[in-house]
Amino acid sequence: MAGPGRLLFPAFVTLMFAFLLAPIVIVVLAAFNSGEYLTFPPEGFSLRWFENFFQNRPFMRALGFSLRLALWVTFVATVLGTLASLFVVRHARRLRDFLRVLFVAPLAFPSILTGIALLIYFYAIGVGTSGGFALGVGHVLVCTPFVFISVTSVLVRFDSSIEEASRSLGAGPFTTFRRITLPMIKGGVVSGAVLAFITSFDQFPISLLLSGIGTTTLPVQLFDYLRFSFDPTAAAASTVSVAITVLAVILTERFVGLGSVYGEKR
Amino acid sequence: MASIHIEEVTKRFGAITAVDRMRLDLQEGELIAFLGPSGCGKTTTLRMVAGFERPTAGAIRFGEQDVTNLAPERRNVGMVFQNYALFPHMTVTQNVAYGLQMRAVDASEVTRRVEAMLAKVQLNGLGDRYTRQISGGQQQRTALARALVINPSVLLLDEPLANLDAKLREEMRFYIRELQREFGITTIYVTHDQSEALVLADRIAVMMDGELHQLGAPKEIYERPASARVADFIGLANLIAGQVTSNRDGAVTIASQWGEIAARGGSELGAGKDVLVCVRPEAFTMSEGSGAPGLRREGDFTVVTGQVRELAYLGSIVDYQVEAAGGLSLRVQAVAGEEFPPGSPVELRFPAHKTWVVGSKPVSGNGPSV
Amino acid sequence: MVMLFFFFVLPYANMLYISFLTRAYDEPYYHVATLANYANVLSDGFNWEIIGLTFWFAIVTAAATLALSYPVAYFMARSSSKRKGILLALVLAPLLVGVVVRSYGWMILLSDTGLVNQFLNWMGIGARKLMYNQTGVWIGLIHVYMPFMVISLMNALSDVDPELEKASRSLGASAWTTFWRVVWPLSLPGVAAGTVLVFVLSVSAYVIPSLLGGYNVLTAPLLIVQAVMDLFNWPLGSALAMVLFAVTVGTITLFNRIMSRAMKGIA
């Protein structure tokens, strides 16, 4: 690139990054701003919107429910996704490609349609949407593929001869899994679990459709709130939700090191 | 230690027969190399002995014990994998100790035996390294140590040297041979490298298309191949087409289109049978020649006159391409010394006892077949 | 696998089935087969208008994200691995934040008294209506789906060996010609993948049109949810969903066919 291109090009790229990050930064700024509306320069620092948020019962209930739901969904999705990946990579012979597509299919289908299909289905089989079972199933459905993809990407790097080596040295299938396979794929499992947690915590379309009474998630509550007003209490709610996501990522980074998941290739 | 008996073992994957009615007995302490091109069934056979695959038919015994349906962890085999299959999340010491821990050996005993084994394979001081932090050769020795430390009844090696560079590979051949002798373990060594098999093995089992083609000592396999394919796969071979005219207790006379050849062969080769004559490149005695190009018999020798077309200097030996009459082209290897430049007329003599008759199935390959 | 069958395959099959049933008022539907729903969907010009608008949104979003993301992806693909990692984290960061939150961020920026309008006033241009209309939806859709495009382009561009560009230049091609004759054709697989992904996501976008469009902009997913949730007309909603689904799959198939012709010899 010659002449003005040398400058224009990085400038454009910087602008695009600003564009990508702007709304998130703005939300956080608005949450700490004391005024009703965000102005430039900001009016002053205040925690009153957070106070508002923490005193707002529907928000608090939704936050609590979202967290509980996300934890359950993460647990179930992690177990299912890991098992599915082990099965597909290590055991499925002829059906392997078909199964691989099948397990990630829920990601390829528009989640709003999946939500509707599940809604109708759960009423048709007489379960309905109360109690959060339907909601949980919906979330597991869209979260499991992340675990599956993540574990699979690690698993395919390890030849099955490593497990065979363990067997030949006298370890049974269970011991081999516990001492060899699991430690090797740990990184993939953990990063898959984090993705599942974040996906569940932020999931909107399926939650909207499958929420019953008392099972409203934070994004849905936020959405409802924003339909009528958008005072910075919503910004505080958003900031808390962003903070939880960031916390999840940082904690994993600290304890497992997400880098190690992909670093081992080198 | 145990003998290994492979009894009429067949393995099919869907419609494909990977191993077809294989029958082979290994004596205690013997090292047999399974040699063959890729896809010949040698690795599948090894995996059945290890217990990773179950035979479709047939049985496998270690000594008196039938292990056909025994899980791999209960067979007490030591196995070295082509990619070594070292546990990436464990140190060298932990890798070697793993098998002993599985056998519930107590901790101090484990430490003692692992240390002794690491010393034996010259890895002392590297025990705390992770396996990706050591060189290929060291990884290879770790894999060997891990397999041997458990005192296995049989040792299975799957192309263990394939990932090493040429020089290290040569060294390791002798090293493995020594180690195997010392431990006296019945060993199956899978390889596609014929020179490896020739150096290492007590006996070689040549496998092709899922079948055992020939079983014998390295010298026997090399000098008396059972078929043109075996001759072509192991070493270089000149294959000359002809017909048996007489066979007296293995002293065979062959009529080729260039003249009569004196050879040796199995007594089952009757007169009139179409055959190929196998002559190794180093079987020729080469001298300055004269006279018209051609092939003639002189008692127990066959003499070819021709012209050097090309030569390649390989250091200790010289590789010639010699053109005789009527499109008969021969590959000749002679000890370096007096060289015959391209165009020089030469005479090649080869004795009947280095001329082996094999079945007439033509081979595809790079050996000059006529 | 069992779970996938019961909670994924069956529900979709069920939806297909219900789309052929008769609408009822005292219960969700009668078990009477009918094509009325499809007739309803297909004959109503309003529905087609909305599907058309939805597709128009999706196509423009795909094209715009492609144009905006290409330089970014190229820049990232040619960065050192360390800088690439940081930039990748920045691109992925928005994906970790819920779409509702991001929409809300845009609402703050774009509202009548929002920062952008404050800035426009200050510049003397005067406030514009940027939200609760199509403009808001454009901005939101492009923003939300751009990371997907950047990532698929970057993967493709990382596979294009920089040596190829040098080779092209050494053969006398200008930077511009090198781009069009070497880099662009080789990046087509990424372009195709990113475009399809963004298109599919945009077609089924729900949050952006409802929050930033403020119900002044009606797209197909909104219509479907309305039919199901507000009107309780499940058969009609299902039929609508199926039609949207079919048209989307059809469009992608067509697109892939065109692209695979363009990519002969690459993929």
Image (cartoon, coloured by chain):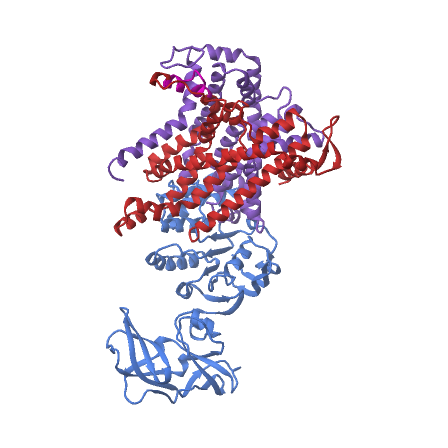
Chain colours: A purple, B blue, C red
Closest to the observer: C237 or C122? C122
What is the x, y in percent for residue A98?
57, 47
Q: Which residues, given as a range, are shown in magenta? A: C107-120
Closest to the observer: B214 or A245? A245
On-image quarter of the N terminus of chain A: top left
- Asked where in the image residue B259 lies, by quadrant, the reply is bottom left
- Residue C95 in the figure: left or right of residue B324: right
Q: Is residue C117 magenta?
A: yes
What is the x, y in percent for residue B32?
47, 63
- Asked where in the image residue A34 lies, by quadrant, the reply is top left
For the question of whether residue B31 can be seen, the reply is yes
What is the x, y in percent for residue C164?
32, 49
Up the image or down, A160 lies above or below B359; here it is: above
For the question of whether residue B103 can be seen, the reply is no
Residue at 48 percent of width and 45 percent of height: A156
Up the image or down, A36 lies above or below B177; here it is: above
Q: Is residue A39 magenta?
A: no
Residue at 32 percent of width and 38 percent of height: C80
Q: Main secondary structure of the magenta part?
A: helix
Residue at 37 percent of width and 15 percent of height: A40
- Residue B67 in the figure: left or right of residue A31: right
What is the x, y in percent for residue A257?
42, 32
Up the image or down, A107 lies above or below B218; here it is: above
